[in-house]
């Protein structure tokens, strides 16, 4: 029994060290990626700039979810890819508001599109949880609302360094300091993991997968 307890403690300690190193790596990526996007070769083309910016959102979403769950089985890779998709797909609302596939129209909107309102995040998460409960998917897909939360929140935090956070109906904040964006993005996976523990989601995921999931 003592041996098993020791192994569990060592495993959790290793898990914690790995997640902290991953968070540090995520912060460094944020720091480097947004500096690279300022290079003139990227800024010269609207399409290259837009695609590069969206790709960074995607990678941050994937990296953040990877920290939350770790990569313990093959299906985790699919979840990580889905997180990246959710983090990047938000920008489609630029084209929806512009009612055009023109990038120029999407980049010159009179106001910010609805999915860039940070108030939408808790509303979308709670709505998804309710729908999953009604469809009896709350156990098999219990991670999905949390994935949506971290993917969209990371996107909003990063956009916040240019435009601030739009918190409807209270208005918007000043642009976030770059250092705050890096720190907030790095620690968002740990906040998400902590909230998942409080909500009991981690216990359900661990039971479903037959392994203990900790960050």
Image: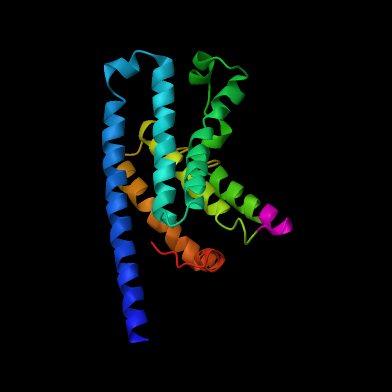
On the image, the x and y values in percent for residue 117 come to 53, 38
| Colouring scheme, one of rainbow, by chain, secondary structure, one colour | rainbow
Please report the residue visible at 34 percent of the width from the left and 13 percent of the height from the top: 44
Q: Main secondary structure of the magenta part?
A: helix
* Residue 135 part of the magenta segment: yes
On the image, the x and y values in percent for residue 87 come to 48, 39
Q: Tell me, yes or no, if residue 179 can be seen here.
A: no
Residue 183 versus residue 139 in the image, above or below: above
Residue most toward the bottom?
1
On the image, the x and y values in percent for residue 169 come to 55, 41
Q: Name the image quarter holding residue 33.
A: top left
Residue 161 versus residue 20 in the image, above or below: above
On the image, the x and y values in percent for residue 164 come to 41, 36
Q: Tell me, yes or no, if residue 40 can be seen here.
A: yes
* Residue 159 part of the magenta segment: no
Please report the residue visible at 40 percent of the width from the left and 48 percent of the height from the top: 64
Q: Name the image quarter holding residue 161.
A: top left
Closer to us: 72 or 45: 72
Residue 48 versus residue 25 in the image, above or below: above
Q: Name the image quarter holding residue 92.
A: top right
Residue most toward the front?
74
Closer to us: 210 or 38: 210
Magenta stretch, residue numbers: 130-137
Residue 23 shown left or right of residue 87 in the figure: left
Q: Quadrant of the C terminus?
A: bottom left
Please report the residue visible at 35 percent of the width from the left and 52 percent of the height from the top: 187
How many marks overall?
0
Residue 146 shown left or right of residue 21 in the figure: right
Please report the residue visible at 39 percent of the width from the left and 37 percent of the height from the top: 158
Q: Quadrant of the N terminus?
A: bottom left
């Amino acid at each position: 029994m003592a041996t098993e307890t020791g192994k569990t403690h060592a495993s959790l300690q290793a898990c914690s060290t790995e997640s902290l190193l991953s968070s540090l790596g995520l912060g460094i990526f944020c720091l480097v990626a947004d500096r690279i996007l300022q290079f003139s070769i990227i800024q010269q083309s609207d399409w290259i700039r837009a695609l590069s910016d969206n790709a960074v959102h995607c990678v941050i979403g994937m990296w953040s979810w990877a920290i939350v769950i770790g990569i313990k089985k093959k299906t985790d890779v699919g979840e990580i890819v889905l997180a990246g998709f959710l983090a990047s797909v938000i920008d489609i609302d630029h084209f929806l508001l512009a009612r055009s596939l023109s990038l120029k129209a999407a980049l010159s909107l009179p106001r910010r599109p609805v999915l860039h309102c940070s108030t939408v995040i808790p509303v979308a998460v709670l709505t998804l949880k309710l729908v999953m409960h009604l469809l009896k998917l709350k156990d098999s897909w219990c991670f999905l609302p949390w994935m949506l939360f971290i993917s969209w929140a990371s996107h909003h935090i990063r956009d916040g360094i240019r435009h601030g956070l739009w918190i409807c109906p209270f208005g918007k904040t000043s642009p976030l300091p770059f250092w705050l964006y890096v720190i907030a993005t790095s620690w968002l996976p740990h906040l998400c993991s902590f909230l998942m523990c409080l909500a009991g989601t981690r216990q359900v995921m661990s039971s479903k997968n037959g392994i203990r999931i900790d960050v």
